[in-house]
């Protein structure tokens, strides 16, 4: 997926073709404002305040206790971005905004917006240092309990669209009975597979700090004892021998170095039963010289900043699996999340 500049008239089309448009201005002046505007709108409750129907600027100003001039400017920008429509003095949520910004929609990214506004935004000021030193934020070592809660809610938001597709399309044994979900915290992926396979149960291995905040999120899945948490550390814990039919490593490899990922893959290979599958579920780093892919490239840089590691290519992921003695099985690219894939190996 790419973001493109779309001319609205022949003069703009000519300016783009003639290289007269200062594209970096859009990146450095406009896009930071766009991002922060959406984040603050979510955090200040602007979207929630309009979920029950159209609202005037005056009514929103009074309800949210915000400055009328500033809120009017924000709403004007959000209207230009497609979050609102404006008619007869009233602002109304668009269908896109209603689906993805409201807290109670099953596909909402609200949790991600709050985490990014209250925690992640400050990290971006450290990008220059990361470029000089290669040392990232290593946020798992620094989050407060409150920030852990924001983080876990953000991870739920990030997987709201992905998890249902994962549950439908993950290539797993039909008779699978046991699953290990490494770093699965909120349990959305485990729950999706357990709903598909009636005989499956899953153990989610995650850090104690993550489980403390993710337990209520897992409870929302109403899976009972079929999906349960187990405190631990993927880098130091042993996964056992021939215990699982499915092992999932979702959105965790990008926090680890290649050496650490190989260690995890080796332990997974021992823990799988014959015929079992190891699924690495990640954004994929585009190969140098390949077709540009914005999500894969931007998350690669972001994960480097936040964890010092980053995204990996399909070949790199497959190499860890094969070195661990597993056989390449399938690569499943998501339809709902561009740039993301399941890289699957089989024992």
Image (cartoon, helix red, strand yellow):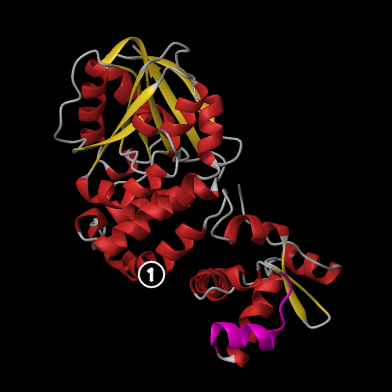
Name the quadrant containing residue 319. Answer: top left
Q: Which residues are magenta?
A: 53-66
Considering only vertical position in the picture, is 52 above or below 306? below
In this picture, residue 65 sits left or right of residue 175: right
The residue sitting at 22% across, 44% down in the picture is 207
Q: Position of residue 168 (x, y in %)?
A: 56, 27
For residue 167: magenta? no
- Answer whether residue 20 is visible to the viewer in this image: no
Q: Position of residue 332 (x, y in %)?
A: 52, 26
Considering only vertical position in the picture, is 319 above or below 337? above
Considering only vertical position in the picture, is 121 above or below 247? below
Considering only vertical position in the picture, is 110 above or below 273? below
Q: Position of residue 223 (x, y in %)?
A: 42, 33
Number of numbered discs: 1
**SS state under label 1:** helix
Q: Which residue does the numbered mark 1 point to in the structure image?
A: 118
The residue sitting at 77% across, 65% down in the picture is 7
Q: Position of residue 304 (x, y in %)?
A: 33, 52
The residue sitting at 56% across, 56% down in the picture is 104
In this picture, residue 19 sits left or right of residue 271: right
Name the quadrant containing residue 266. Answer: top left
Characterize the local packing of mark 1: few (<14), some (14-19) or many (20 or more) Cα atoms within 10 angstroms. Answer: some
- Of the 4 image quadrants, the one containing the C terminus is top left
Name the quadrant containing residue 77. Answer: bottom right
């Amino acid at each position: 997926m790419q973001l493109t500049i779309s001319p609205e008239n022949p003069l703009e089309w000519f300016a783009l073709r003639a290289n007269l448009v200062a594209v970096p201005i859009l990146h450095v002046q406009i896009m930071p404002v766009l991002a922060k505007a959406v984040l603050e709108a979510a955090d200040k409750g602007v979207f929630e305040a309009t979920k029950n129907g159209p609202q005037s600027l005056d009514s929103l100003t009074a309800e949210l206790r915000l400055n009328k001039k500033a809120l009017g400017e924000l709403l004007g920008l959000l209207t230009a971005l497609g979050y609102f429509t404006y008619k007869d003095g009233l602002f109304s949520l668009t269908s896109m905004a209603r689906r993805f910004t409201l807290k109670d929609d099953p596909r909402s990214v609200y949790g991600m917006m709050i985490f990014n506004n209250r925690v992640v935004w400050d990290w971006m000021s450290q990008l220059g240092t990361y470029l000089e030193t290669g040392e990232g934020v290593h946020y798992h070592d620094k989050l407060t309990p409150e920030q852990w809660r924001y983080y876990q809610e953000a991870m739920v938001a990030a997987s709201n669209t992905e998890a249902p597709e994962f549950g439908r399309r993950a290539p797993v044994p039909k008779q699978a009975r046991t699953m290990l979900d490494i770093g699965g915290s909120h349990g959305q992926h485990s729950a999706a597979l357990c709903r598909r396979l009636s005989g499956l149960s899953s153990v989610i291995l995650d850090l104690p700090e993550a489980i403390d905040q993710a337990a209520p999120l897992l409870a929302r899945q109403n899976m009972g004892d079929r999906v349960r948490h187990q405190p631990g550390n993927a880098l130091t814990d042993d996964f056992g021998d021939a215990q699982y039919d499915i092992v999932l490593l979702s959105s965790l490899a990008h926090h680890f170095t290649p050496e650490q990922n190989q260690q995890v893959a080796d332990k997974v290979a021992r823990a799988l039963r014959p015929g079992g599958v190891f699924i690495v579920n990640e954004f994929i780093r585009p190969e140098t010289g390949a077709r540009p892919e914005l999500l894969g490239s931007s998350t690669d840089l972001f994960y480097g900043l936040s964890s010092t590691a980053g995204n990996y290519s399909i070949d790199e992921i497959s190499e860890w699996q094969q070195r661990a003695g597993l056989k390449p099985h399938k690569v499943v690219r998501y339809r709902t999340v561009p740039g993301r894939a399941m890289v699957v190996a089989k024992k």
